Image (spheres, rainbow, N blue to C red):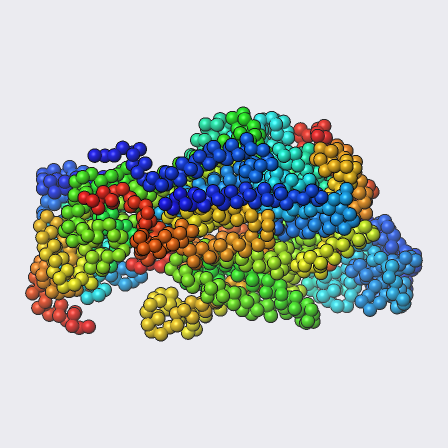
Amino acid sequence: MSTAMHDTIASSGRASDSRVLRPGELDLTHKVILYLEDISVSFDGFKALNNLSLTIDAGELRAIIGPNGAGKTTMMDVITGKTRPDTGKAFFGQTLDLTRMSEPEIAHAGIGRKFQKPTIFENHSVFENLELAMKTDKRVWKSLFAQLTGDERDRVSDTLKRIRLQAEADRPAGLLSHGQKQWLEIGMLLMQEPRLLLLDEPVAGMTDEETERTAELFVSLAGQHSLVVVEHDMSFVEALGGQVTVLHEGSVLAEGSLAKVQNDPRVIEVYLGR
Amino acid sequence: MRTPLTVRLFQSLPRTAWLALAIFAAIAWIAIPAAHLLLPESSALHVSAYTVTLMGKILCYAVVAVAMDLIWGYAGILSLGHGVFFALGGYAFGMYLMRQIGTDGSYGVMLPDFMVFLDWKELPWFWIGSDSFLWALFLVVAVPGLLAFVFGWFAFRSRIKGVYFSIITQALTYATMLLFFRNETGFGGNNGFTDFKRILGYDITSPQMRLVLFGLSAALLIAVLILGRYLVTSKFGRVLAAIRDAESRVRFIGYQPTQYKLAMWTLSAVLCALAGALYVPQVGIINPSEMSPANSIEIAVWVAVGGRGTLIGGVIGAFIVNLAKSFFTVSFPDYWLFFLGFLFIGVTLFLPDGVVGLWRKLRARRPAAPAPTGTAPAVATEQPAADTPPPAASTQGARA
Amino acid sequence: MNTRRSFIKALTLSASLAAMGSVSTLAHAADTIKVGVLHSLSGTMAISETALKNVALMAIDEINAAGGVMGKQLEPVVVDPASNWPLFAEKARQLLSQDKVAVTFGCWTSVSRKSVNPVFKELNGLLFYPVQYEGEELEKNVFYTGAAPNQQAIPAVEYLMSKDGGEAKRFVLLGTDYVYPRTTNKILRAFLHSKGVKDEDIMEEYTPFGHSDYQTIIANIKKFAAAGKKTAVVSTINGDSNVPFYKELGNAGLKATDVPVVAFSVGEEELRGVDAKPLVGHLAAWNYFMSVKNPTNAAFIKKYQDWAKKNGVPNADTVVTNDPMEATYVGIYMWKQAVEQAKTTDVDAVIKALGGQTFKAPSGFTLTMDKTNHHLHKPVLIGEVRADGQFSTVWKTKEPIRAQPWSPYIAGNEGKQKL
Amino acid sequence: MSPSLHHLLRILWLTLCCAFGSAHAAPSAETLARLAADDSDTRIAAIAELGAEGSAQSVALLDALADEALALTGDGRLVILTDTGALDAASGSAIAPYPDDAEPLMVNNRVRNALQSAKAATNIRATDRATRLAAAQLLRDSAGEALMPILEPALDAEPDKEIRAILALAVARVNLASAEPAKRIRAAELLGDSSDASVKAMLAALLDKDGNGQFAEPDAEVRAAAKASILAIERRLAIADLASTAFTGLSLGSILLLAALGLAITYGVMGVINMAHGELLMVGAYATYVVQGLFRTHLPGYIDSYVLAAVPVAFLTAAAVGMLMERTVIRWLYGRPLETLLATWGLSLVLIQTARVIFGPQNVEVANPSWMSGGVSSFADIVLPWNRLVIIGFAIFVLLLVWLMMQKTRLGMFVRAVTQNRAMAGCVGVPTARIDTLAFGIGAGIAGLGGCALSQVANVGPAMGQGYIVDSFMVVVLGGVGQLAGAVTAAMGLGLMTKILEGWAGAVVAKILVLVFIIIFIQKRPQGLFALKGRFVED
């Protein structure tokens, strides 16, 4: 069912016909874009996620923090379909059961993911990286004869501008600096035009200045996109200024504004305890 | 402004490449036939029948090498079982050739000799229609294509990668070989098919027929090179390369890697089959040993020697290795294996990008051309070489 | 542009190859006669074929030392088809069209012969094929100095049914799954029927090439033999598989006195690879044994062993002679005689002259090349394996037998005995 | 039993009648002459006489004839050739000069048979138990009416239980044809204890109807007894069948395991695709061959123990070759599996050709030491060949060795550390490069051991390795990479599977089916039988 979904925004607005949604379309009645309910995942006995429940509202910018092994990455794996949960529900909007969809289907439905370690196509030029990510019909037959239309090219160059890589457009992505790679990956996410962005430590290895700009970018994205940002860098989390969720041993420990969670004794215990 | 396919096909190769292909075509279709038919044997320029068949054979190998390069060099899938598709193509066409023998066989009956051996009274069902040239052509494409499709569908769907894939392809060709060795299987067992007489009624040993087959092999090679070049410069090719480098990422941006791999895999198999079909009438025999794992591995070596991910590399590799084989097996029979062995080792150790890669490095030494860059061996090959304009889309993109 | 350069590279290579060819033709000096030797020196068949190459070279040296053929020295052209059947055809074409050899001695497996046949026919060459084979073939350009089925298989079975052979009543036909065993067994089955042996007293089994685990099969043979009647095994197991087969046989306690095995592909060379003690008493049917006692053979063996030492053949001190080697040797001399009789190396003339040639072979018999069917009249010897890996002849035909390449036991072969 | 034997035994019996009582004299010249006759019948008669008459001199003659040491000189004298010289056959006195023209008398299977029975007839009266046992066993299968005069007294005189049982069977077989029904019933019942298919055939014959519906055996009671016995035998045979299939499966499995264990380390643990693995087996096998050669020339007395000496040699040689490979080639290709695959394939070609140049293209002879040839006959005449038993044991030993090496030694710990996290191991001071070399060396050495074992059952030749490489990879991949337990299960599973299929579909089809099964299985479980789970599986 890899049909590209057109103008989800429009359709999602119309709560009325959410019953007659074509498969793959996002239903945002109740204004919630992501439900995780009692998700548990265990590897050879080790419980990576333990009855994790979490909801993200449409347009929200959510930061997720937590010590190593808290299950942040595993959570993203579950959302993007890389890992299947042993128990629990994961819904995208009201209708799309993420536990039943493959990675590409989920990507089509509108979830974009940025990995902890920037994964881009090192042998392709920056331009090609974005081109490949661009939201379009991604079936074999189409790609065989695909060629860029003018406005597609404009969209790519807009993104290039946005992530400040115009100069590098034709360089192989493998030659970019770490920070630039992070940006390129974010750019690829944008090209997918996802409804929900999952960003795993997006500013690792960035200069303060880059970090700042990333924060601005994310804040500007919030609203018509929903973002889930996993980050250790508290100043960055602060700059995002959204809700914060603290994960610990695979389940939610605390939730609320950064100030609130930072004064939560259990959170302090978890962080200072080790 | 969509450019028509023909134009883009043309754009996909640089002018110089077209020139080279033209030269090659001229030699294959004019010079060699002339030298073979017109020049007297005494003249130094005379091209003997031996040379023509040998070259024809190697051209078929070259096609196989390019097919292998498409799947290995560009999709990162090393098949150790391509011999099976080659052989199946050969068998499919061989069935037709066997039927063309008619009653000239040693038993003077319409049945192929080996069936008389086995006391078979009539043709088994899968031979029905094999006397029709068109049906034979259809089988040549359909049978290996189907096998490749089914096998690939299961393998890629269950995400079998890298070495695992290589090893089960080896198992595939090995199993098929044993199957064809059986006499009951109905393909002549160990002896396979030999002693062909004619194609479409024309004597198969006549110099004209020999030249036609040679010319067709050359044509096939040219076609495959152009097609291949188009594929790898199209978006399809870029997606495949992306899958090779970071499959999971590709999945997360919404492509179905399975379908892409499967498409290229099946195409590659079909190209091998076509080569096999042209190979059999030229060498005059097809038998199960074509499917032995060793043969399939040798295909990979041609590509490695020539240079992975550079279509032309396959062609060069196929020529180097096979000419060397023809040379050694006459002059130093005892050292052939040593040579081949050290070639394997040397290339993988010192020429990760094969001959073409080496040549590009030398070119890159010159200040004019920017050095091919990157870390993985694939990088250098993936990089548009200094003197090839980068793929159409991205240049336009750059200008936008 | 690399594409162009590489094409040019490719072309120069091909040119150089063409040159290579012509060079070798130029090298073809007038005062020598070129003789092709087409045996695999690498790959699976090297095990068997290398020895044939050696004996061919030895014979050529010998002839040259004795003044050559019609005063011309013989010049061997050795090529290695590397156990690769298409390569056999290619090499054959090269020998005939590039090197212009007057005659070729080569091939072991039927498939290699079938692969070169069309080439010899097309270019009207001359091939001597020295190995026992399934028959069902008769090519104008080929002379078969090995045994046809009626010169090996049938006498062997007759012997097994004889009093001294143990009066076998049940037969296991065991072979590697390819044409020679299949055809031979087909002929034998028909022959056994004609002797009144019922189908339930015949068991036919085939194994893949290089099969190395004979436990099950030997267990089956034991069961089959337990039915009370005297049982014998007729083995057409090929090459490598014999060692594991005989080892298993020995260890499973199947003694030759209970269930004798007669083999058609096991000779002195194969037994070099086995510890022969457990095999004593098992049989082989050939047209020559190294152990045959007569001056010609003694000389033949001596010559070969000296040649092997002189030319540094690996473990030269233990080299043996066997049937296909004798057949090669005989073939070369028959060709020499034919050429000298025809006073030319022209293929057609030589073919005409070959019919009726006679030669005193190491086997102790004087062999005749049949006037019509291109096969030798050969004696049949049945030998029992000795502990030293040699055979002691326990039965032999009174005089050479004429070959029947078209076995009368295969339907549709009636009246097919000549070209 | 074959009529010819009948005939022989009848003569034997006749001669016995006259021979008994008559003092044991030296064989007459006339008998000797007949020994050397051309016609087998005459010779067999002569042999029978000698056997019956059974004097030391005759036995010596028979033995000499059996091992083809009895020769006929040019001037027609019979002599016994020994290593030291020649003895006169008649007198047994040494003769000089050594007769160079002596031609050993030809012995064919028929004559050999006669010799055996003749010896058995004498040996059944021997004092040594083992000799009697052997004789009894031979007679059990071949005895007939004619031999009763020997059998019955032998049976009465026999002190040993086991031998008596065997002789009883022999007698019963004969009695089955006896005139008195009582005897026949006894015999039929007694034969129920046999587990010999041929006995079953005999009994079944009784139940056959002839043309006019008459049973071959008139007496109903006898038939009943026969039926019962047949069932008993069939039950035993059925069990025997299962047992032997299981055994053959295990022994094939153990061979696969030995072939694959080395790979389980180099590929399974280190992730090196070593296409030259088969050639490491070959190295081990040739090492064994060389050791055997050395023993033959230098320590012929200890030839039987050459295998024991070969084991360490095979290990070290293969290990050395392996380490050389690692140092020169493989080391530069870590993390590039496909390149490794090609390079090692190249290595394998070089090794093959090297072997061909050194040892020649032919297979070389590696003999089972006497203690490894032959087999133990367990019940229902299944023979378990010694070499296979030894190899099963050896497989277990090697397995244990590997396990200990990987789990219990410091080296093993390092290896596991390096393979799990190279960088980290390096940081904590593990000499990673050296460990790689050593680990590969061990893997190669284990392969060498496998080769040493293979030399005892299969060919030893330059290309022998090619036959095992595919199977070895199948075992490792099927078992799951890096899983010793997996490799064991896979090897045994494949072994049994092959054998069961082979019994049912024949060797060729069995092989194909197994390969197809593997292909399908890997589709289902890409990680093999014993898959590693966890979030790191992906990469």
Q: Nearer the viewer, residue D67 or C341?
A: C341
Q: Residue at x 50, y 51 (%)?
A: D497
Decide if residue A103 is in sight here: no
Q: Residue C283 vs residue D322: left or right?
A: right
In which quadrant will I find the C terminus of chain D? Answer: bottom left
Q: Residue at x 61, y 38 (%)?
A: C97
Specify the quadrant of the image occupied by residue B192.
top right
Residue D46 image point, x, y percent: 86, 55
Residue C334 image point, x, y percent: 76, 41
Residue B289 image point, x, y percent: 54, 44
Q: Is residue D511 above or below residue B52?
A: below
Tell me how many marks there are.
Answer: 0
Decide if residue C84 is in sight here: yes
Q: Residue C176 vs residue A167: left or right?
A: right
Q: Residue B234 vs residue D93: left or right?
A: left
Residue C150 image point, x, y percent: 73, 38
Q: Residue at x 37, y 38 (%)?
A: B18
Specify the quadrant of the image occupied by residue A76.
bottom left
Specify the quadrant of the image occupied by residue C86.
top right
Q: Nearer the viewer, residue D28 or B348?
A: B348
Q: Nearer the viewer, residue C128 or C217?
A: C128
Q: Residue at x 23, y 48 (%)?
A: A127
